Image (cartoon, rainbow, N blue to C red):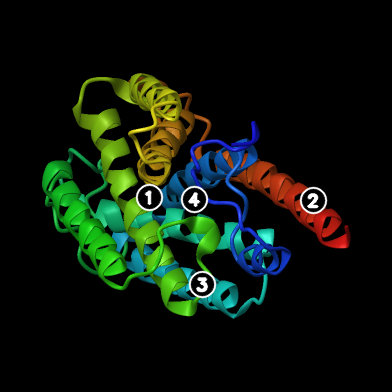
Amino acid sequence: MEESEVITGLDVATTSDRTESVMKKLPEVTLAFWIMKIAATTLGETAGDLFSQTLKLGYFLTTIALFVVFVVTLVVQLRSRRYNPFFYWTVILSTSMAGTTMSDFMNRDASAQFLSNGTTKLGWGPQGLGLGYPEGAAILISILLAIFLAWKLSGMTFQIRDIVTFKAEALFWAAILVSNTLGTSMGDFLSDSSGLGYAGGALLVTGVLAVLVALMKVPAVPNVLLFWIAFVLTRPLGATAGDFLTKPVAKGGLDLGTAGSSAVLLAVLLGLMAHAQVQERQTAAR
């Protein structure tokens, strides 16, 4: 395994034609990949909260709007003939934003536990199902396992670099959407209900991720399994980091606001995407 690859276990294609085909749609899973993933998921948390809470559109309307955004970005990605960093990471961002409000709609309601400053309603429509984080997480885990079961029964590979068919990529993105929604539930539980707080929750997830990196050296542990666990866990890391940036100081946050934090994170992500685009063009030109 090359030193630049982190939690991948993805087989390198054996021919130049095969390498060219698998590199058309999905990126290399390197350290830069994980940095961009965390940036996108943190932005997904702050931007989702910006629309649903700061702008008071509510979880219901925001979920519908962001799910439509996800579908549009996904169609662009699926129709693309080769890997484009802007297309790929825009879908990751849209799944993170939609996952944030989908999780909030499932787990929260209009009670004082979730709405502050005397607010009793957010936007039009249902205020939330109020399932709670454990129940919501159990449902999402069940859905994610069902997706992986369907993926397994289809006979298609879980190796990310070998995903080249429409059906396999559709399953991949379905798993991404549910895993980001699940990660939001996990992050909110760590931040709001576990007693760890925002910084404590982020440190816990970071510690678990460090263990996953160490497990890469254990031959008996499939690296593909480590990849998906890490992919899920980087979402609660982004959720707790996003809450730490935006929530009031009295609740353990930095109170930087959802708008300001989202703007800074968007600038960082766009810079990383532009850098990835330049690298991709340089690679294609060789």
Against 174, is 34 above or below?
above
Residue at 50 percent across and 43 percent down: it is 8
Identify the residue position indicated by label 4 in the image. Answer: 47
Residue at 35 percent across and 25 percent down: it is 208
Residue 132 on image: x %, y %? 14, 45
Q: Amino acid at mark 2?
A: Gln
Question: Of the residues tagged 1 and 2, which is closer to the observer?
Answer: 2
Q: CA distance from mark 1 to mark 4?
A: 10 Å
Identify the residue position indicated by label 1 in the image. Answer: 53
- Secondary structure, mark 2, is helix
Q: Amino acid at mark 3?
A: Leu
Q: Residues within 10 Å of mark 1 (few under 14, many from 20)?
A: many
Name which of mark 4 and mark 3 comes first in the sequence: 4
Residue 118 on image: x %, y %? 25, 41
Q: CA distance from mark 2 to mark 3?
A: 23 Å
Question: Of the residues tagged 4 and 3, which is closer to the observer?
Answer: 3
Which of the pair 45/62 is nearer the observer? 45
Q: Residues within 10 Å of mark 3 (few under 14, many from 20)?
A: many
What label does residue 279 carry, if any? Answer: 2
Q: Residues within 10 Å of mark 2 (few under 14, many from 20)?
A: few
